[in-house]
Image: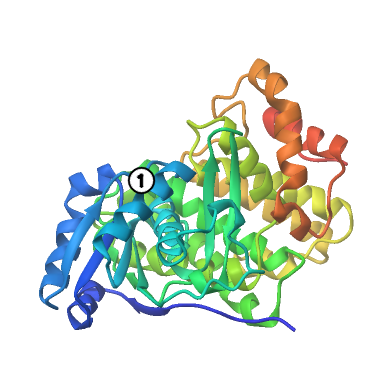
Amino acid sequence: MWFFKCPEFFFGEDALSQLEMLPGKRAFIVTDANIAKLGFPDLVQKALADADIECQIFAEVEPDPSLQTVQRGAEAMLAYEPDWIVGLGGGSSMDAAKAMWILYERPGIEPESISPMEDLGLRAKARLICIPTTAGTGSESNYGIVLTDTAEKRKLTLGSREATPDIAIVDPIFTKNLPAFITADTGIDVWSHAIEAYSCGWANDFTDGLCLQAARMVFNYLPRAVADGPNDEEAREKMANAASIAGITLGNSQVALAHALGHSAGALFKTIPHGRITAIFLPYTIEFVANGSVGRYADLAAIIGRPASDEAEAAKKLAAATRELMQQINLPTSLQAAGVTAAELEEQLETLCEHVIIDTNTLMSRRIPEWEEVEKLFQYAFDGRSVDF
């Protein structure tokens, strides 16, 4: 038995106006300082004011939000007593909002213990709205929560089905003036989500079509959005929708080995954005899985116009297409090109491998690597060598 869970979506031009219809008294907006400087919380506040809802803003979320930030935000919620929580921003702000909401509803719970195995009893106090300001993480679409344990220097992959947002507002107005490099870094994350959710061990009939559509949309529209996002309204809207479509698959299927490697490396090489570092590993993990004769890549290759006669050929074409897409949007395809030095990799290699081995997403891979194979994957991804093992 499996399940399918997603929010209620409002998408397209002027989707933000849906906030004017909400019942309630107080909303707590979770965002970051950069989003606040852009004035996006003001747009949300204005729409909520039209619904006679007061707001308080918490604009302290950092990239890869820490447990400490989540606890601080939850304390502010407990003092304000909102009936709506609004996660506004990229994945960091939306994930932080989910975690803060859980601690607001369940003040005694430890964030590290958030799990699909425990009933949380959410919505006794508030409901959750997520509003993405990038077209990438898909956090608005699912119950996943990624936090950082700063003491242990590792990312925690958490979640509960109850933490699925009640409403997702996907309005392309928020991505209109994103710099090209942010459009690229977040957009390539959508590609990784679609590829891994389709090819992982928990892929299923309900998510396969979503994965294929999202992959096709990214392949067609991401280069356009990077090249001329402010003026290419179609590309911007298609990428916003693709991010949410792929995001639905994250909880209803899963992601796999590239994300495990990306989580591990991203926690240590903090200057490399999540979408970029995860995508760097994607072609290498496609090759690794296919070399074990357990790949599921033929439909993905075909949907982007690279049909193949068998899975082995499909994997090669899909890995090549991934590298070509990254080069087209000016992203590196190796750790070395991303700025990691050989000395840094050697120094951190044991920790990197340890964190991959214990990452839940590793178990979702159709081929699960041994420790020595994880080491080789890091080394091949550093050098930019196609995987031959």
Q: Residue furthest front?
A: 108
Q: Is residue 156 visible?
A: yes
The quadrant of the picture occupied by the C terminus is top right
Residue type, mark 1 in image? Val
User: Residue at horizontal 61%, vertical 78%?
Assistant: 209
Quarter where residue 175 is shown: bottom left
Q: Position of residue 220 (x, y in %)?
A: 47, 62
Quarter where residue 338 is shown: top right
Residue matched to label 1: 61
Q: Position of residue 302 (x, y in %)?
A: 67, 68
Q: Considering depth in this image, is 29 or 375 the residue closer to the camera? A: 29
Q: Secondary structure at mark 1?
A: loop
User: Residue at horizontal 18%, vertical 63%?
Assistant: 55
Q: How is the image coloured?
A: rainbow
Please give left or right for residue 232 compared with residue 266 in the image.
left
The quadrant of the picture occupied by the N terminus is bottom right
Please give left or right for residue 281 compared with residue 294 in the image.
left
Q: Position of residue 256 (x, y in %)?
A: 70, 56
- Mark 1 surroundings: few (<14), some (14-19) or many (≥20) residues within 10 A: many
Q: Considering depth in this image, is 200 or 179 the residue closer to the camera? A: 200
Q: Is residue 385 visible?
A: no
Q: Considering depth in this image, is 337 or 343 the residue closer to the camera? A: 343
Please give left or right for residue 28 compared with residue 293 in the image.
left
Q: Considering depth in this image, is 127 or 316 the residue closer to the camera? A: 127
Total number of numbered discs in the rendering: 1
Relative to residue 106, is residue 167 depicted above or below? below
Q: Position of residue 289 (x, y in %)?
A: 81, 53
Relative to residue 135, is residue 33 depicted above or below? above
